[in-house]
Amino acid sequence: MSTVLTKGTAAQPPVSKVGVPAVPLLGNPAARPVAVAHPLLLAGLFAWRFNALVAEPVETLQTALPVVAAIQAVYAVLCLPVAGSQAAKAVKKPRPGEKKKAEGGPNALSTAVLSLLLTAIVTPALHLLFVLFGAPFLTHASHTFLACAHFAILAVFPIFYVRGVDTEALQAVLGASAPLDSTFGGLVGAVIGAWLGAVPIPLDWDREWQKWPVTIVVGAYLGYILGSKVLGTVFYDKRWATTPATKEE
């Protein structure tokens, strides 16, 4: 009696598809000191310019924006893996006998520039989102837009730098199912901080710093710093929401 062998899925066990991975910091010698100095530099710059922010919000936010963008770009280039690099994505285990493909890594500087451009593109959408959540619509437009620009540079730019325009990864970030790391933790912290920053505005305290958008910007900065360092370190690779595991043949 002859036995017939046929191709099918039973011949090979299904392999679990790797989900969106957490993004670690780079392990080069320059990354560690820059990662430590990064939040201190942001906090120091903000503390130094706080009185000016209260007195002249638009002028202060406008002049500080390129400085913050430069700080974020240097931090990303030296400390974060570039979108598309092996360090920024899950590495699939090669099959027995399969040779690992040699890949040239993407350029960090060009990726940083493109990420800044993408960040600038999404800033008007953030402005609209802020308005939908209660920001002034007919007045203080420049105040709101600059606050959104700072939020985007802090929290959105690093996401674009490490995730690129990967649809699956960006959907995981928007759906809060991405693992916590320094980039996603920073985004979560900035969102929570900006939301909490709106609490003191309507209170009848008659303080100069209660005017729009000072407390929003304060909350975004504090939230980003705490989120990127605390959530991204203590709860690294933890997920708030999980998606069902999928199988590939």
Image (tube, helix red, strand yellow):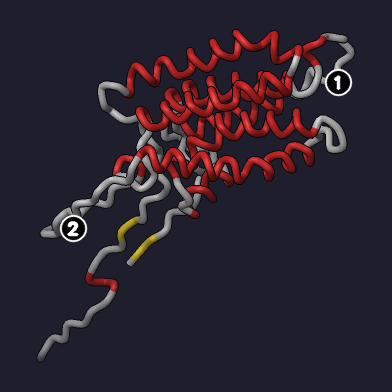
- Quadrant in the rendering for residue 55: top right
Q: Position of residue 184 (x, y in %)?
A: 50, 35
Q: Earlier in the sequence, mark 2 or mark 1?
A: 2
The amino acid pointed to by label 2 is Arg
Label 1: few (<14), some (14–19) or many (≥20) C-alpha neighbours in 10 Å: few
* Viewer-side residue, 54 vs 14: 54
Residue 203 relative to residue 71: left or right: right
Query: Which SS class for mark 2?
Result: loop
Real-space Cα distance between discs 2 and 1?
A: 61 Å
| Vertical relation: 51 (above or below) 120 | above
The amino acid pointed to by label 1 is Pro
Check residue 216 in the rendering and tell me which mark sits there, or answer none. Answer: none
Which residue, given by chain and number where applicable, does mark 1 sit on? Answer: 202
Q: Position of residue 119 (x, y in %)?
A: 56, 41
* Viewer-side residue, 88 vs 231: 88
Q: Nearer the viewer, mark 2 or mark 1?
A: 1
* Viewer-side residue, 240 vs 27: 27
Residue 175 relative to residue 81: left or right: right
Quadrant containing the N terminus is bottom left
Check residue 95 in the rendering and tell me which mark sits there, or answer none. Answer: 2
Residue drawn 47% across the image and 44% down it: 114
- Quadrant in the rendering for residue 124: top right
Residue drawn 36% across the image and 56% down it: 17
Residue 147 relative to residue 244: left or right: right
